Image (cartoon, rainbow, N blue to C red):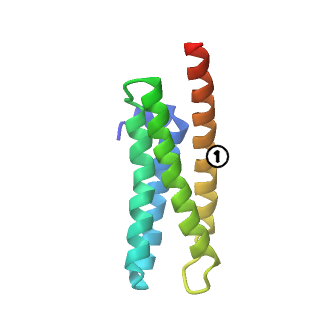
Amino acid sequence: MNEELKKGNLIVQMTFDFALSIIPFCTELDDLKKWSLSNQILRASLSIGANVKEAQNAESKADFIHKMKIAAKEADEVEFYLEVCNKSEKLPDCQTLVEQIHSICKVLNKIISSSKNNYINSIS
């Protein structure tokens, strides 16, 4: 990934760092033979960053908002899975990941909200 893009863009950096952080956790789940859960968490987690990255090259403001909404939906899904894992006594602790995904969700929702407001104001 372009290092300049990551340095200058908070959500790109956050989602990239989160993707790297989720891999060891999913490896732990694999070791516990929780393959389905691991696969679901890994795929959704990587999708967050992929959609954020794709949004950086959106064809329009509406396209940008749409891609960020997809990222937010994936983040909500991951947040749910991680909270379930965190509450389960049979699964590894993932509080740090829960905190990371909460922050990502907040930033994504703020970006979407601000982008929608700017888009609506520009067409009014």
Q: Is residue 35 above or below residue 102?
A: below
Is residue 43 toward the left or the right of residue 123 in the image? left
Q: Tell me which residue sits at (55%, 14%) in the image.
A: 123
Where is residue 97? Give x, y as percent. Answer: 57, 63
Where is residue 23? Give x, y as percent. Answer: 42, 65
Inspect this view and state whether residue 54 appears.
yes
Where is residue 66? Give x, y as percent. Answer: 46, 36
Quadrant in which the N terminus is drawn: top left
Occupied quadrant, residue 57? top left
Inspect this view and state whether residue 27 appears.
no
Q: Tell me which residue sits at (49%, 39%) in the image.
A: 68
Q: Residues within 10 Å of mark 1 (few under 14, many from 20)?
A: few
Quadrant in which the C terminus is drawn: top right
Q: Tell me which residue sits at (40%, 39%) in the image.
A: 53
Disc 1 secondary structure class: helix
Q: Is residue 38 above or below residue 98?
A: below
Occupied quadrant, residue 26? bottom left
Where does label 1 land, which residue? 106
Q: Is residue 77 above or below residue 118?
A: below
Is residue 59 toward the left or the right of residue 69 in the image? left
Where is residue 58? Give x, y as percent. Answer: 39, 29
Q: How many labels were placed on the picture?
A: 1
Residue sitting farthest toward the front: 124
At label 1, the amino acid type is Lys
Q: Tell me which residue sits at (41%, 64%) in the image.
A: 42
